[in-house]
Amino acid sequence: MGPVIPDIGLAGIGIDPISAAIALVGSFLFGLITAWVYKATHRGLSYSQSFQFSLVLLSMLGAVVMMIASESLTRAIGILGAFSLIRFRTAIKDPKDMAYILLVLSTGLAMGAGMYVLAGMTVAFTCFVILILTWTNFGMTSKHEAVVRIMCKADTKGSSVNIASYEALFGKVTDSFRLLSAHARGDRMELTYGVRPKGGKNPVEILESLRKEASVEDAELFDAKHQVEF
């Protein structure tokens, strides 16, 4: 009688191969659905294809971690020790991105624990809520702020930059405005204002008004409605 070779496969560690396959495939599909909803509802400048990949992979890895940890307390402690060595250097610019990460991790953990119905309900209901909140533009105020940067030169007398004329113009085309920064460069000055356009007015009309000022050499506007950062 030959030596007995130990079984080191999935069955040897108490994990059903069929259950493992269901968990991995299911978490992969749920990760794809979540990534698609993220892409369809994303607003702003922080969109990243690598973040899309991460959502799918994190869902699957969450399932794997849960399957390993659920079989042994020792393994669970070992996983915590391994994850303590990982440092995530990428800054999350949009708070919604963190919510998506939590969603895919929760889905993966539920699939790894065999809670398939809970995982499916979580993805379906959460994605439905995301679509509804995006469609209704939830949380958006009726008036948003824009950032206007003006590069101007001294007036014809060469004495100083006529800031009062710009602020008088802002008083006509905006509901409110405030000076954010001023940078002097010789006889020129760069001014940055935060403005709230009047209701029904296109923010570009502010630039059209500034073009009529003889002392304005250059002007640009950033609409802050859908931007995470400048």
Image (cartoon, grey):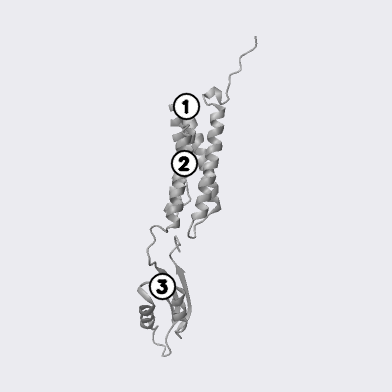
The residue shown at (54%, 26%) is 16
> Which residue matches tag 1?
71
The residue shown at (65%, 11%) is 2
The secondary structure type at the circle numbered 3 is: loop
Please, what is the three-letter code of the amino acid marked with disc 1?
A: Glu
Residue at the top extreme? 1
Residue at the right extreme? 2
Say if 51 sits above or below 117 in the image: below
Q: Residues within 10 Å of mark 3 (few under 14, many from 20)?
A: few
Marks 3/2: CA–CA distance: 42 Å
Q: Earlier in the sequence, mark 2 or mark 1?
A: 1
Say if 190 sits above or below 99 in the image: below
> Which residue is at the front of the view, 34 or 161?
34
> Which residue matches tag 2?
105
**Which quarter of the figure is the C terminus placed in?**
bottom left
Q: Residues within 10 Å of mark 2 (few under 14, many from 20)?
A: many
Rendering coords of residue 139 (x, y %)? 38, 58
Q: Earlier in the sequence, mark 1 or mark 3?
A: 1
Which numbered disc covers residue 200? Answer: 3
> Which residue is at the front of the view, 160 or 130?
130
The residue shown at (56%, 28%) is 17
The residue shown at (42%, 84%) is 154
Residue at the bottom extreme? 157
Give yes or no for contact between labels 3 and 2 (Cβ–Cβ under 8 Å): no
Q: Which is more foreground, mark 3 or mark 2?
A: 3
> Which residue is at the front of the view, 26 or 162?
26
Residue 186 in view: no
